Amino acid sequence: QNFQENRIDGAALPLLSEDHLTGPMGMKLGPALKLRAMLARKLGACTVCLHCAHCHQ
């Protein structure tokens, strides 16, 4: 619901930082980090992950 209220679409989603997600979006840090890692993995931009086995299966 917060994503809709803040008009976060597919183009804006990868631009969100942990601060955006945990602040205005109201997410807990763990889920915010997992979301960012999943997006980085899907988009092939691993700037937020440590290239661990969990992300690169």
Image (spheres, rainbow, N blue to C red):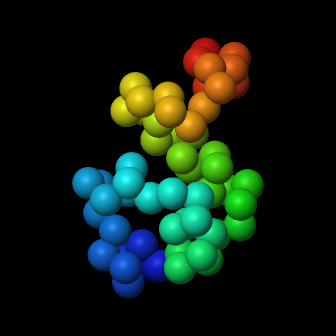
Res. 18 image quadrant: bottom right
Image x and y of residue 31, in percent:
67, 56
Residue at 39% x, 50% y is: 14
Please identify the residue farthest to the bottom as the structure is shown. Answer: 5
Of residue 34 and residue 23, the one placed in the foreground of this image is 23
Residue 41 shows in this picture = no
Q: How many marks?
A: 0
Residue at 50% x, 29% y is: 46
Residue 42, compared with residue 14, is above or below; it is above
Residue at 64% x, 50% y is: 33
Image x and y of residue 12, in percent:
31, 59
Of residue 15 and residue 6, the one placed in the foreground of this image is 15
Horizontal arrangement in the rendering, residue 7 relative to residue 56 (left or right): left
Residue 40, compared with residue 9, is above or below; it is above
Image x and y of residue 20, in percent:
52, 68
Residue 37 shows in this picture = yes
Horizontal arrangement in the rendering, residue 26 relative to residue 7 (left or right): right
Please identify the residue farthest to the left as the structure is shown. Answer: 11
Residue 8, compared with residue 53, is above or below; it is below
Image x and y of residue 37, in percent:
57, 39
Res. 56 image quadrant: top right
Of residue 45 and residue 55, the one placed in the foreground of this image is 45
Residue at 65% x, 26% y is: 50
The C terminus is located in which quarter? top right
